[in-house]
Image: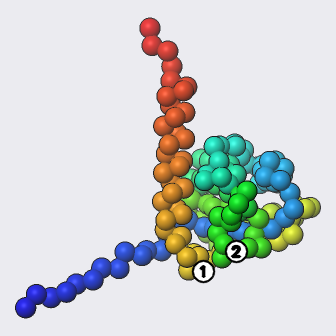
Amino acid sequence: MAKKVSLETRSEPALFTLFGISCHLRDFRLSYLLNNKLELEFVKMDDFQGFSFYFCRDDDQYNAYYLLGNRGQEALLLPDLKQTDFFLLVEGPFKKMQKDRLLEKIRGIQHVLTAFEVRFETIKNYESMLNDLELHFMNILKEAKIIYSPIKK
């Protein structure tokens, strides 16, 4: 008799940390205030499935920051978190002390109502969202290389 083996494909995203931000600011205003408060340089990218999308890389800490709007024109990016207006996704190593300091700085922004860490276990289909986000970002980088490639003589 053949044995049946089932594989569990769901894995915990070890190098991702997700923060929720509730505020009444527009995306460009929040990115500007985050740039000033966190000393980062968010850049507006092509929208991610109709949701605002900003990116920043911190080479000193080996982290990449993605600022995503939760509210699109017709839907929510993560319907499980209706009260959240924006998500800050941090890719890379992030210690508890860094998380606490980041949350404290975000909460210190005048128009931010609250900021909190979001556990991936509370989000349905977070793997597909992370995969879609990664594919979207790879497409942006691919297009940027084509557009900004140096002229060969």
Residue 2 coordinates in the image, percent (x, y): 10, 87
Q: CA distance from mark 1 to mark 2?
A: 9 Å
Asked if one can make out residue 36 in the rendered structure from this viewpoint, the answer is no
- Residue drawn 50% across the image and 54% down it: 134
The residue at the point 50 percent across, 43 percent down is 139
- Residue 118 spot, x, y in % from top left: 66, 74
Seen as rendered, the residue at the extreme front is: 74
* Res. 31 visible in picture: yes
Q: Going 56% across and 80% down the picture, which residue do you hit?
A: 121
In the image, residue 107 above or below residue 153 = below
The amino acid type, in three-letter code, at marker 1 is Thr
Q: Nearer the viewer, residue 55 or 139?
A: 139
Percent coordinates x, y for residue 75 in the rendering: 68, 64
Badge 1 local density, few (<14 within 10 Å), some, or many (20+)? few
Q: Is residue 135 left or right of residue 55?
A: left
Task: Return the residue found at the far left.
Answer: 1
Residue contact at pointers 1 and 2, CB within 8 angstroms: yes
- Residue 122 is labelled as 1
Q: Earlier in the sequence, mark 1 or mark 2?
A: 2
Q: Residues within 10 Å of mark 2 (few under 14, many from 20)?
A: some
> Which quarter shows the C terminus?
top left
Label 1 element class: helix
Point out which mark residue 81 bears.
2
